[in-house]
Image: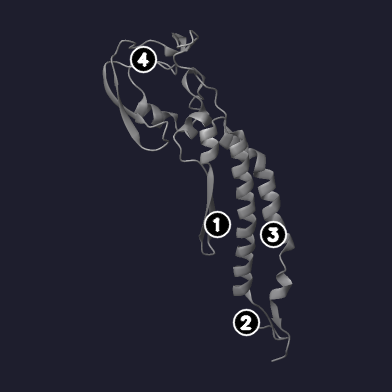
C-alpha cells in the first residue's frame, strides 16, 4: 500500500472487488432483458420456452454471460428451413450443417426426399441428441415443398413447409446493444470511487 505525502492511499483491492460486483449486478439485469427479447422474437414456442441465461464470472479478468437455447429447433427458428433458409452469408453454421445432415439427393436448399436407407439426424422434437430414421426412397430427389398430402379431414397441406428465418438472436442482440453500452458506462459514472480513498494523516 503506497501513501502519498499526506498519508492518503487508495484501497484498490476493495474498490476492484466492489466494482466487479457492480458490473455483475448490472449484467445480471441486462442478460435478463436480452433473454426476454429472445423469447419474444422466437417464432417457435418450444424455442422460446427453452431460452435461458447463465453468467460465468472468472475473477477480475473478465465477466462472461451466456444467453440462448440449446434446443435443436433454435437453429431452424433463427436461420429458417428449406428454400427459405438463410444462405451462408447470414448463417455461419450452414456449411457445418450441410456437411453433417445434407444428403446427396438435395441439390438446393429445398427440402428433398432422401434415397433408400437409414440416416441419422438431430432429434428436433426433443431438442437434444439424435435419432435414426429409415427412408423407402420412393420420393428420392423430389422437392417435398411442392408435394401436397391430405389428412383425415380431406384438407391438403405441403408435405414439407419451408420457414423464413426469424434471426431472433441477432435481432435481439442488436436491440439491446445500445442499452448494454449505456448501462455499463453508467456503472463507471455512478461508482463511488471516493469512498475508497483512505488515510489522511501525515507520516
Residue 42, compared with residue 104, is above or below; it is: below
Residue 113 badge: 4
Mark 2 neighbour density, 10 Å: few (under 14) some (14–19) many (20 or more): few
Residue 71 badge: none
Q: Are marks 1 and 2 in contact (CB under 8 Å)?
A: no
CA gap between label 1 and label 4 equals: 46 Å
Task: Report the mark closest to the observer, 4 or 3.
Answer: 4
Residue at 61 percent of width and 64 percent of height: 21
CA gap between label 2 and label 3 equals: 26 Å
CA gap between label 4 and label 3 equals: 55 Å
Mark 1 neighbour density, 10 Å: few (under 14) some (14–19) many (20 or more): some
Residue 187 badge: 3
Where is residue 107, by image quadrant? top left
Task: Report the mark closest to the observer, 2 or 4.
Answer: 4
Where is residue 13, by image quadrant? bottom right
- Residue named by callout 1: 63
Which of 87/84 is in front? 84
Q: How many marks?
A: 4
Mark 4 neighbour density, 10 Å: few (under 14) some (14–19) many (20 or more): many
Which of 44/94 is in front? 44
Q: From this viewpoint, which residue is outermost toward the left?
A: 117
Sequence-earlier tag: 2 or 4: 2
In this orientation, does residue 66 appear? no
Where residue 44 appears, as percent x and y from the top left, is 54, 30
- Residue named by callout 2: 2
Amino acid at each position: 500500500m503506497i501513501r502519498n505525502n499526506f498519508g492518503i492511499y487508495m484501497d484498490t483491492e476493495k474498490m476492484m472487488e466492489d466494482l466487479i460486483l457492480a458490473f455483475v449486478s448490472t449484467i445480471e439485469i441486462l442478460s435478463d432483458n436480452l433473454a426476454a427479447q429472445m423469447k419474444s422474437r422466437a417464432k417457435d414456442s418450444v424455442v422460446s420456452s427453452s431460452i435461458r441465461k447463465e453468467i460465468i464470472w472468472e475473477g477480475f479478468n473478465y465477466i462472461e454471460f451466456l444467453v440462448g437455447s440449446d434446443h435443436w429447433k433454435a437453429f431452424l427458428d433463427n436461420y429458417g428451413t428449406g428454400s427459405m433458409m438463410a444462405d451462408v452469408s447470414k448463417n455461419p453454421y450452414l456449411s457445418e450443417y450441410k456437411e453433417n445432415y445434407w444428403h446427396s439427393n438435395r441439390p438446393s436448399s429445398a427440402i428433398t426426399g432422401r434415397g433408400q436407407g437409414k440416416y441419422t439426424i438431430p432429434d428436433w422434437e426433443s431438442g437434444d441428441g439424435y435419432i435414426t430414421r429409415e427412408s423407402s426412397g420412393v420420393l428420392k430427389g423430389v422437392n417435398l415443398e411442392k408435394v401436397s398430402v391430405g389428412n383425415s379431414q380431406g384438407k391438403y397441406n405441403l408435405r414439407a413447409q419451408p420457414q423464413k428465418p426469424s434471426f431472433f438472436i441477432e435481432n435481439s442482440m442488436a436491440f439491446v446493444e445500445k442499452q448494454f453500452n449505456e448501462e455499463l458506462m453508467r456503472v463507471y459514472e455512478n461508482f463511488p470511487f471516493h469512498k475508497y480513498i483512505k488515510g489522511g494523516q501525515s507520516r
